[in-house]
Image (spheres, rainbow, N blue to C red):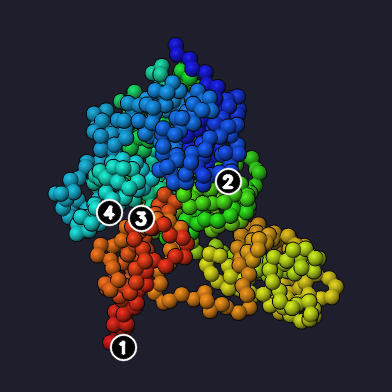
Amino acid sequence: MRSDVIQTLLVANRGEIACRIFRTCRDLGITTVAVYSDADDGALHVREADLAVRLPGAAPADTYLRGDLVVAAALAAGADAVHPGYGFLSENAAFAASVQDAGLVWVGPPVKAIELMASKTRAKELMAGAGVPLLAPVDPATAAEDDLPLLLKAAAGGGGRGMRIVRELGALPGELLAAAAEAASAFGDGEVFAEPYVERGRHVEVQVMADEHDTVWALGTRDCSLQRRHQKVIEEAPAPGLDDALRTRLRDAATAAARAVGYRGAGTVEFLVSADGRPYFLEMNTRLQVEHPVTEAVFGLDLVALQLRVAEGGPLGATPPSPSGHAVEARLYAEDPARDWQPQTGALLALDLPDVPGLRLDTGYTGGDTIGVHYDPMLAKVIAHAPTRAEAVRLLARALERARIHGPVTNRELLVASLRHPDFAAARLDTGFYDRHLAAVTAPAAGRDPARAALAGALAAAVTATSGGPAPTRFGAWRNVPSGPQLKRYRSEPDGAEHEVAYRTPRTGAPEPHDAPGVRVLAVTPDRVTLELDGVARHFTVRADGDRVFVDTDAASYTFTALPRFTDPATHTEPGSLLAPMPGTVVRLAEGLAAGVPVEAGQPLIWLEAMKMEHRILAPASGLLTALHAAPGHQVEVGALLAVVQEDPAAIPVPEETA
């Protein structure tokens, strides 16, 4: 029997997945090797590794996607094995082959299995032969109204890239071109196929683990239906609301899929389950999944440790452990869900979650790190495990609510609102959840009180100033008239609302609010304020960083920017200016777009690629494009002027009552 005992492992990945694999390696006594781009110099996964090798450059194509450089790094560091993680080269058969050709142990499935599952179209043909249930493909050239709606998908890759929903036949040619262009850009393969789009479908998957001794484990089910842009946001195990017959059918189909390709190691078989409970094979991911921790929690397993055991030639047990309880995972992204999910960048000043039983944090960042523009905006995964689904959901929502996350805007409040939404609580899950409920889960939560949070921030800053410490905000000449009310203006993030705070600073004692009925100051220090609000004592934790103030309570978090007393006219831009919402690369322009052409309100004009996602820049109004400064391939910084649209008054609809 083959036995390759791994002593030193290189992880061909970055961020939280590299950190997570390193954690298991430390437990097993395996030396760890990181690779890193120039953009990741000093990143957490580099700091946590025993050894690290630089891949010169910043863009993924020049660094983490260069299999030759990764193999060379493994040899230079003396590694005897390579773990691909997920993303990047993890499902690249040529890379897997090159690792083995270099005499290194590949901690992944056989090259042949990766090849067979690399193309979704070829994988579906293979699965049909194995008796796995499938959706019938649709030929776009002969598609008719009866075939709508259609889902266009890239044959290679995943993560929602190259995916489009088509509800009108006339839009099909344009969407095919756009999907093919995005797929070619993301995966180097522009092949796109079409299949029926299942309304209200659920994304349910089965974790498989197989060894070379003909053992295949099907480790329960996961529901991953809550998605934005076809990328998962919240996952859980087991998938709720499935009857025993459907669970058995899914496990049997996943096992058949793994056996059909001679699978080894960890993999995931993904299904779409229709509203009437019929499962359809989507794809097989020949790697570890982002959401693997929920399966680990329920089965009490370390899937990375099992991957390493299988790679060393070791056997799995005859049967897997029995599952216990329920686990839910939320992906914490640096993004603004209310603004088209725009990714956010900048300094992450704090990332702290409660340390309570049943809670797990997988992250590639700590406070003090910087969120850059080159990679996925996921900051962390937060996982809760409890005896029941309701308890796990409650634990996760409360932990996220109590977390201290200071820096870029995140989706934290959306996650909390999603977990507490009635449809989620009742397990009414499908991939259209955010299409229907985005407005509800991005609305300000009940109980938020930004005005009083701003007051707490101002009082803490006043104490800091009077105590001689660093004053994070500017209070004008309040020391000259200590008995008069002082005014402070804040703008809250990300909604942009402004709050004016009035307070007094007596000659002795703590500062106190001015003209604020129902508010009494109980205690004030530079980092903690306790106010009695309508008879209830509430605590506010305050942290300042320059003109930004972060205020956390037991149930909400607020970010403010201190504003000057007067606005700066130089900050205004020309009406109709289209500014880059983030740093990125211009990947394409609307067909025929040029200065002097008319545009329609809401028309996509420019496509930017940033942090593994495409973002459309829309015309703000109907009118004339008077300037165009963007071109495909241009690198732009946040706030860069891309184009200017001059609004046409004649294009503004006249209200019917005045027409």
Of the two numbered discs 4 and 3 on the same chain, state the one appearing first in sequence. 4
Q: Residues within 10 Å of mark 2 (few under 14, many from 20)?
A: many
Of the residues shown, which amino acid type is indicated by label 3? Answer: Gly
Name the residue rendered at 41%, 34% in the picture: 67
The nearer-to-camera label among 1 and 2 is 2
- How far apart, in angstroms, are the residues tagged by discs 4 and 2? 34 Å
Along the line of sight, which residue is nearer the eye, 385 or 503?
A: 503
User: Which residue is farthest top?
Assistant: 1
- How far apart, in angstroms, are the residues tagged by discs 4 and 3? 17 Å
Query: Answer yes or no: do the residues labelled 1 and 4 have beta carbons within 8 Å?
Result: no
Residue of label 4: 178
Placement of 138 over or under 445, stated as above or below: above
Query: Answer yes or no: do the residues labelled 1 and 2 have beta carbons within 8 Å?
Result: no
Q: Position of residue 455 (x, y in %)?
A: 68, 70
Along the line of sight, which residue is nearer the eye, 655 or 100?
A: 100
Q: Which mark is residue 594?
A: none
Residue of label 1: 658
Residue of label 2: 365
User: Which residue is farthest bottom?
Assistant: 658
- How far apart, in angstroms, are the residues tagged by discs 1 and 4? 41 Å
- How far apart, in angstroms, are the residues tagged by discs 1 and 2? 57 Å
Residue 133 seen in this snapshot: no
Name the residue rendered at 67%, 61% in the picture: 544
Q: Residues within 10 Å of mark 1 (few under 14, many from 20)?
A: few
Residue of label 3: 633
Of the two numbered discs 3 and 2 on the same chain, state the one appearing first in sequence. 2
Of the residues shown, which amino acid type is indicated by label 2? Answer: Tyr
